[in-house]
């Protein structure tokens, strides 16, 4: 659910006209709905009200400081995957003891930085990393609380690029080797095995893979306690899917109902790392039509946003709905169309072979469900400045990230003197 609706013939973010926003901030732009963000966070949290829990929002899905701060104010924490994300978390004022640090390739500098700040838990992805975290912790004189990420080998039935919990995945440790790994962890001076982590994939649209994996990891928690480990945290990762098209994913309350009965007696603090389900449908990308074009076999609409602004369609063949900002445009004749960007790549499209109404030059087009893995995956490819991010609340809007400038594009670049000295003939 979200708060992007037609009002008086025009698509609005809450009570702000997207046409007016386009006039005031230019296009393309990302716009988020405050009401949708807070509602999604609240609904997720309420689903687990009956148990001790911490919602560590997966900030790789949307890392704008304003949004991180908002979730912090609502009692949430963060799931981070890099030193840069830890820095952002700090800038947003997030308490370090609400941060979990995931990722297969943490560098020594990142580990030391996280230890110095005192993050809640490291999600550990390999034996070598575990041993290294112990070494870094001993060197800096800290204790690292760790949760080993285990692979329950459950197929989440989602896109292969976002499937992470299988035996063949680069993520996590085979669950059959978990007890031995915890024994290693306990033997390391700087390491305190305190939790178990599991994240099986993303955009999962049924409860059963979650229920299956929870059953497996809950059993493991029992065994680890039997082995003498003080397992206080069970981190169940993220991955709950959203409706991009016609998917009908479980509601957070359905998800909770599917897993809580298997967890109630464990007495662990439950940690969740939702990303997409919180922000995905809380943001859209608004872009303007530049040109139309027909080749013998294809009809194209060329817009001013491309794969550098929103890469999901190109990267995962992801479907994102496309709505005209002007409501009446929905009644125009429809054609099978590719909605493509200005980037010099054939893979640069936001919608492919899609049944769309005719669009004309200067029309505004909304690419829905862009609030997660949208701006955070944007790049400067083709030297295109990244778009601004706008947060709407009722009738107000706030620019929470400015549009990049051409100067931003060349910041930090230098021409060495021996090249600069050469005359341009
Ligand atoms: C990406 C990721 C998440 C968030 O996934 P969503 O599908 O956006 O909920 C959570 N945990 C880990 C470890 C991740 O890599």
Image (spheres, helix red, strand yellow):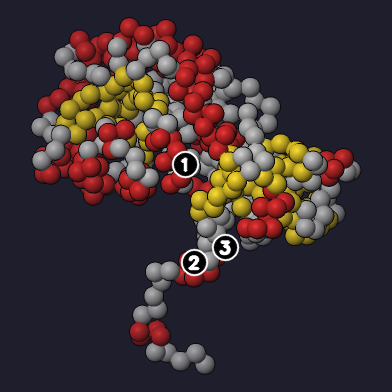
Q: Quadrant of residue 218?
A: top left
- Whole-angstrom CA distance, mark 1 to mark 2, is 25 Å
- Camera-side residue: 258 or 162? 258
Q: Position of residue 266 (x, y in %)?
A: 31, 10
- Camera-side residue: 157 or 394? 394
Q: Nearer the viewer's eye, disc 3 or disc 1?
A: 1
- Whole-angstrom CA distance, mark 3 to mark 2, is 8 Å
Element under disc 3: loop
Q: Is residue 216 above or below residue 93?
A: above
Element under disc 2: helix
User: Ligand 1 near label 3 (Cβ, under 8 Å)?
Assistant: no
Q: Is residue 1 above or below residue 137?
A: above
Name which of mark 1 and mark 2 comes first in the sequence: 1
Residue positioned 61% across, 39% down in the render: 394
Q: Is residue 68 left or right of residue 406?
A: left
- Camera-side residue: 287 or 36? 36
Residue 384: assigned label: 3
User: Do residues under tags 3 and 1 come within 8 Å of each other at their CB atoms?
Assistant: no
Residue positioned 52% across, 20% down in the render: 252
Q: Position of residue 408 (x, y in %)?
A: 48, 66
- Whole-angstrom CA distance, mark 3 to mark 1, is 24 Å
Q: Position of residue 232 (x, y in %)?
A: 25, 19
Residue 409: assigned label: 2
Q: Position of residue 421 (x, y in %)?
A: 39, 89
Q: Quadrant of residue 59?
A: top left
């Amino acid at each position: 659910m979200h708060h992007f609706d037609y009002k008086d013939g025009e698509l609005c973010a809450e009570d702000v006209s997207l046409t007016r926003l386009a006039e005031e901030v230019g296009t393309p732009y990302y716009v988020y709905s405050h009401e949708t963000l807070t509602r999604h966070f609240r609904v997720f949290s309420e689903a687990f009200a009956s148990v001790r829990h911490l919602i560590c929002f997966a900030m790789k899905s949307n890392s704008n400081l304003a949004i991180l701060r908002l979730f912090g104010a609502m009692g949430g924490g963060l799931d981070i995957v890099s030193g840069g994300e830890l820095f952002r978390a700090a800038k947003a004022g997030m308490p370090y003891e609400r941060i979990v640090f995931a990722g297969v390739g943490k560098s020594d500098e990142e580990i030391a930085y996280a230890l110095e700040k005192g993050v809640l838990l490291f999600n550990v992805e390999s034996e070598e990393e575990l041993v290294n975290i112990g070494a870094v912790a001993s060197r800096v004189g800290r204790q690292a609380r760790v949760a080993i990420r285990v692979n329950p080998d459950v197929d989440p039935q989602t896109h292969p690029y976002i499937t992470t919990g299988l035996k063949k995945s680069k993520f996590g440790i085979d669950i059959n080797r978990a007890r031995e790994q915890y024994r290693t962890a306990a033997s390391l001076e700087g390491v305190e095995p305190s939790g178990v982590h599991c994240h099986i994939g993303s955009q999962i649209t049924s409860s059963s893979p979650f229920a299956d994996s929870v059953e497996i990891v809950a059993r493991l928690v029992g065994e680890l306690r039997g082995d003498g480990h003080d397992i206080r945290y069970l981190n169940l990762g993220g991955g709950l899917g959203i409706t991009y098209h016609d998917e009908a994913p479980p509601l957070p309350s359905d998800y909770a109902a599917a897993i809580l009965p298997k967890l109630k007696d464990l007495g662990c603090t439950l940690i969740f790392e939702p990303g997409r389900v919180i922000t995905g449908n809380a943001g859209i990308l608004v872009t303007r039509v530049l040109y139309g074009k027909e080749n013998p076999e294809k009809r194209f609409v060329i817009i001013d946003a491309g794969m550098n602004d929103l890469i999901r369609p190109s990267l995962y063949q992801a479907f994102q709905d496309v709505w005209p900002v002007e409501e009446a445009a929905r009644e125009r004749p429809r054609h099978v169309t590719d909605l493509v960007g200005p980037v010099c790549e054939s893979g640069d499209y936001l919608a492919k072979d899609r049944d769309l109404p005719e669009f004309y030059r200067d029309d505004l087009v909304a690419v829905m469900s862009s609030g997660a893995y949208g701006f955070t995956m944007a790049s400067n490819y083709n030297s295109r400045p990244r778009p601004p991010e706008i947060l709407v609340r009722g009738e107000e809007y706030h620019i929470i990230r400015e549009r990049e400038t051409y100067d931003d594009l060349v910041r930090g670049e230098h021409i060495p003197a021996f090249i600069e000295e050469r005359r341009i003939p």
